[in-house]
Amino acid sequence: MIVLRKIVLLVLITISFNVNAQPLTDENINKFLAMYSNDYSTHAMRLIKGFKKFKADYDYSRFLDFKNNDWLVKYNLDKDVYDNILQTNRKYLFDNGLIFLFSNFSNLALRANDLFFALKRQDKIKINQTNDLVQSDLKALIDLFKQKGIEFRPLVRN
């Protein structure tokens, strides 16, 4: 029931943001970046935390269940929001060098698949490489915040 309530809340927030959304501008970009950083870091940290739970035993089947039935469901809700934002603000995002944010967000799903296959093959090198890629994407976000003079403080939700 709690998960259903959270999903309903996320849908309402998504609808509210999309219905009331103004095009991205220099005046509202920091608000958008705060929302993005919260969502991105939440999904990245949940993925890594879920992965670590099953990594020690190389339990790829339970990780797959977590990835597909828990993580991906919540991730896709936010990804739909960002796909819409990208479509309606492509020029602004391109002109301001922010298009990488959307690539990073989309890449999380690819990283999740890479972690699954690395776990299944017990490939420690691929596990480390994929973890490094997630960390690198997060660092790029933190660097963007520093450049814009914004304090990076993600509000990680479960």
Image: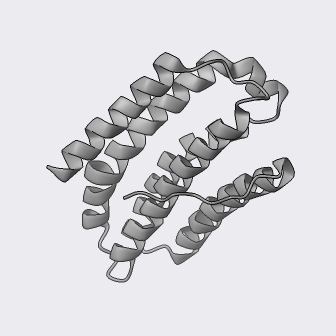
How far across and how far down the image is residue 16, in percent?
A: 43, 25
Which residue is nearer to you in this view: 43 or 157? 157
Look at the image and tell me in which quarter the C terminus lies: bottom left
How far across and how far down the image is residue 53, in percent?
A: 35, 75
Q: Is residue 95 left or right of residue 19?
A: right
Q: Is residue 99 visible?
A: no
Instruction: Please give the name of the residue rendered at 19% of the width and 52% of the height, measured from the top-left corner.
Output: 2
Q: Is residue 108 visible?
A: yes
Q: How many numbered badges does the structure rendering display?
A: 0
Which residue is nearer to you in this view: 152 or 96? 152
Which residue is most to the left?
1
Up/down of 111 relative to 13, above or below: below
Instruction: Please give the name of the residue rendered at 59% of the width and 43% of the height, measured from the top-left corner.
Output: 36
How far across and how far down the image is residue 48, in percent?
A: 47, 66
In the rendered image, which quarter is residue 25 located in? top right
Instruction: Please give the name of the residue rendered at 72% of the width and 61% of the height, measured from the top-left corner.
Output: 139
Instruction: Please give the name of the residue rendered at 47% of the width and 47% of the height, measured from the top-left corner.
Output: 109
Q: Is residue 51 left or right of residue 41?
A: left
Which color scheme does this rendered protein use? one colour
Up/down of 6 relative to 140, above or below: above
How far across and how far down the image is residue 141, in percent?
A: 71, 52
Which residue is nearer to you in this view: 132 or 60? 132
Which residue is nearer to you in this view: 106 or 34? 34
